[in-house]
Image: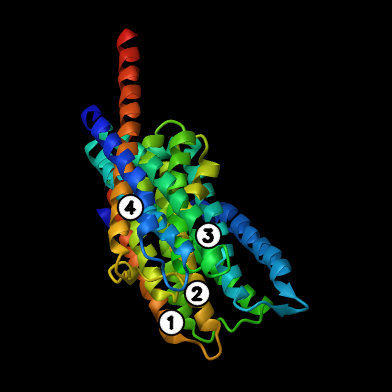
Amino acid sequence: MKKIFVPLLIVTTAMFAYAPVMIANAPYESTMGLVQKIFYFHVPSWFAMFTAVFLCGIESAIFLFRKKPSADRLAVAAGEVAVLFGLMGLVTGPLWGRKSWGIWWPWDARVTMALLVELTFVGYLLVRKFAGPGSDKLAAAMAIFGMFNVPFVYMSVNIWRTIHPKTSVVPTLPGGMPGPFWFCVAAFLSLCALLITARLHLENQRAALDALYLDEE
Amino acid sequence: MFTRIALLVLRKDVAIEFRSFEILSTTLFFAVSCVLVFAFALVRDGEVVADAAAGILWIAIAFAGTLALGRTFERERYAETVRALLLAPAPRAAIYVGKLLGIVLLLAAAEVILVPLVALLFSAALFARPLLLAALLTGGTVGFAGVGTLFAAMLVRSRTRDIMLPILLYPITVPVIIAGVRGTAALLAVPSDDSVAVMWISLLAAFDVVFITLALWTFEPLMTE
């Protein structure tokens, strides 16, 4: 883990340093103008969040069924990072919505469900912290259920009519926009990997410390 | 073997409940107070806000269900019944199914009184489509109780279970509440929108299948010491 941390750090820093340049050079969207540029950070933060959510869910399942403590440590790291990126999406979303729809919070299906997935994983962190002995298993169940809830999130989007841009907006981006967009997605995914690596390292050190204490006794 | 154990667990819960009616009476009282509190918020000048009846009904079911789940498993802690159940040479999944059936029966009994009450107080035509309403209530109750039974069972040994149960339960079961509320609202619309209700019922059915399978799958590793 330590080995990939430094290269990841360099790549991520370079990408985030260059991202504003690419976004500034991207063409203006015809009706929304400047405010549409939030899109380059808003959508990638959700990409990063869902990557972390699925990592957390899968690792939790491995922990629960194979009883591997290392999977649990990766799950905590991914869970915290998921909440962080979700928060980023929930902050950038209303900023954009206020300008283009005139309201901060449109209560449409996708926005509500994004909030719900975020809440599930805030719940995951609360359970980890406050549920007392055995909280790692409780949290793992929460993460697995949260992961399986995501398709229901997606289904409800298609059922309800919504003012949120449809998922089909990404493949049909006008010229000049896909470049910066996918660059930002890559930057966010690399940031996500970087944060998870750092957090996992901390968790590993904690486990090593606990093992040392137990050896002393 | 599996069904017999599940039914034995169910029989134990029903027998205890029949002696005192403790959970049913308290849960029902709580649900009715819930309906009244929401009535003060949502009835203006004698007129009910649109779709309020559907919302109130499902909020009352969810809140009362949480209370019932907490109480049912609190009972299991007396005299270490949980340990006895887990030590019994029985498949863990059968114990889960037995507890689930007990909770569903309890909530169904509460709904039998709650639904006519809501229909009466808010002059909602809940019985215009009895079969569809029954399907919605069954799908919703089974989904809510399916997730709730698992979470309440794993929280039995936790110190902070009173606060942890809603934290775990509500974010996961919100699809159930949405489907229940929107489906019931579709039935209450004039004329009632049956195709929308059927669509929400099928979503509930999918939710029930996925989450009960998950619960059966995770109950065993979760309930080991």
Which residue shows up at 54% across the image and 65% down it?
A99
Distance from the alpha carbon under mark 1 to that under mark 4:
39 Å
Q: Which residue lies furthest to the right in this view?
A: B45
- Residue B8 in view: no
Residue type at tag 4? Cys
Q: Earlier in the sequence, mark 1 or mark 2?
A: 2
Question: Answer yes or no: do the residues labelled 3 and 1 have beta carbons within 8 Å?
Answer: no
Q: Residue A184 carries which label?
A: 4
Q: What element carries label 4?
A: helix
- Mark nearest the camera among 4 and 3 is 4
Mark 3 = which residue?
A94
Mark 1 = which residue?
B196
Residue type at tag 2? Arg
Residue A93 at x, y = what percent?
A: 48, 59
Distance from the alpha carbon under mark 2 to that under mark 3:
25 Å
Q: Mark 3 lies on which chain?
A: A
Same chain, labels 3 and 1:
no
In depth, the one of B104 and A27 nearer the eye is A27
Which residue shows up at 46% across the image and 73% down it?
A31
Residue type at tag 1? Val
Distance from the alpha carbon under mark 3 to that under mark 1:
30 Å
In depth, the one of A100 and B3 nearer the eye is A100
Q: Which chain carries label 2?
A: B
Residue A28 at x, y = what percent?
A: 41, 66
Mark 2 = which residue?
B182
- Mark nearest the camera among 2 and 3 is 3
Distance from the alpha carbon under mark 4 to that under mark 3:
20 Å
